[in-house]
Image (cartoon, grey):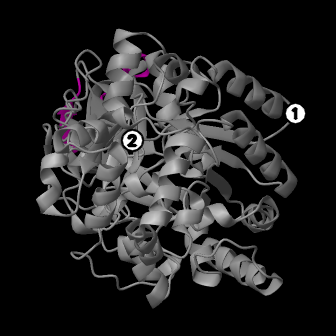
Amino acid sequence: MEQLVIRDADVVDGSGADSYRADVVVDGGRIVSIVKEAAAAGCQRPRAVRELDAEGLVLSPGFIDMHAHSDLALLRDPDHSAKAAQGVTLEVLGQDGLSYAPVDERTLEEVRRAITGWNGYGDDVDFDWRSVGEYLDRLDRGIAVNAAYLIPQGTVRALVVGWEDRAATAGELDRMRELVAEGLRQGAVGMSSGLTYTPGMYAGDAELTELCRVVASYGGYYCPHHRSYGAGALEAYAEMVALAREAGCPLHLAHATMNFGVNEGRAPELLALLDRALDAGADITLDTYPYTPGCTTLAALLPGWASEGGPEEVLARLTDPETAERVRHDLEVTGSDGCHGVPVEWETIEISGVTDPALAGLVGRTVREAADLRGETPWATARQLLVRDRLGTTVLQHVGHEENVRAIMRHRAHTGGSDGILRGSKPHPRAYGTFPRYLGHYVRELGVLTLEECVARLTSRPAARLRLPDRGLVREGYRADLVLFDPETVAPGATFAAPRTLPAGIPYVLVDGRFVIEDGRRTDVLAGRAVRRTPV
């Protein structure tokens, strides 16, 4: 007898087709039978060891988070309800060009310091890997949800070139190509870049194109956080489209937003650019989160020249008055490349997390509010915060536009990604609320997408980008990574005031046919594993 039958579910199968009522039978981690209501008329219904009454619930494939920052969270937090409770059954890690493999001893320490604001320093993690394959093996010991990995181009550059702002030599480029190929052979699904983050931002288009040629040869995709989401955003998108075309590499645009005042109402221009490329045969997808504010580290706003050499060099520049004044001028007057070419507006920069407990009183305030409280200029406050917190401060950037969010969400290349940073005492609510917000706010309340359209964008479309032949659809023979939710009540619990609140209306989530969420509560099941690239 089979393991489980989910009875009388309204199946939204991920294809975009209309829903249907069915009994779905699960055994051995896969969907073994789907008996539609019409087909079951007059027939004996399937039986199993366990029967789950799904009356009033939608059954869909598990959601795929195309842009996750859970690289260490999956290891340090077996519960991982932040994602499991949303119905996420697969996360794509290694984002924005910076993560923890491949590394050597030097690079590992540098990367840990550089992205402390994203993932914490990792004192509670045993870094017993160095290669991509070893990191994936570590995930295979058992995690809350499945995870795929992108080779981080910035980490590769740090390992081979260092943190200097210069072109790679021919020999260094050859070594970077070897590392990318090695990571893909070991199971990475593609390569990411963070082209407003050091040291990835120091790579020119020729260098990136050569690495993308390697990615394409292994059937992977390129996922850039490109050079600007503010001033010059359209040019930055066009640069990535042209680069991917030259390399013959599939392109997935990370958190594809149009932010800051200069881009208000300009999403149609971006979508027209993408449509022209798609109509010409380009292979392009993108992801977005359903919120207007962004989230990053305070140090990420600094100009690229000030970040050259790695974290210690950055701190040395910030403590030198003359150099610090140059940084301020770039931030407040010129428009730093780290702040997307737009002069910083301190009233839009909200402190969301610190690593030094003595600074906790500043969390929840904008930099301008904190400066007014302290009776000093915003730059003085920001500078002190960067130095005292050793670049570990995370911030929210309130610079987005709702009309842009909705327009991009409707596009044919769209998928969902949380970009969820789980660290800090007041993180962005997207880390806990992205997927129920899509279903509750943008489907049920606003009707921006139909339920079937939305589920496809969160399931089959990401699975196709990842080249996963047995995930992303409710189909016989497919993996039983499934979510059951109430379409009338599903909603995020997370808000900007209470960002760690779990969602409502998602009572059951299965990974590999096992319940990780049951009756709305996290079980102790660790059924997640590394999902490796399908060889070409």
Point out the image quarter for the C terminus. Answer: bottom right
Residue 137 vs residue 229: left or right?
A: left
- Seen from the viewer's position, the closer of residues 298 and 93 is 298
Residue 92 vs residue 219: left or right?
A: left
- Work out whether 87 lies above or below 268: below
- Seen from the viewer's position, the closer of residues 207 and 321 is 321
**Image location (x, y in percent) of residue 506:** 23, 32
Instruction: Name the kind of residue labelled 1 in the image.
Output: Ala
Residues rendered magenta in the picture: 37-54
Crowding near the residue tagged with mark 1, few <14, some 14–19, many ≥20 C-alpha atoms within 10 Å: few
Residue at 51% in and 19% down: 406
Where does label 1 land, which residue? 280
Element under label 2? Answer: loop
Where does label 2 land, which residue? 62
**Image location (x, y in percent) of residue 24:** 35, 35
Residue at 76% in and 73% down: 167
- Front disc: 2 or 1: 1
**Image location (x, y in percent) of residue 304:** 58, 60
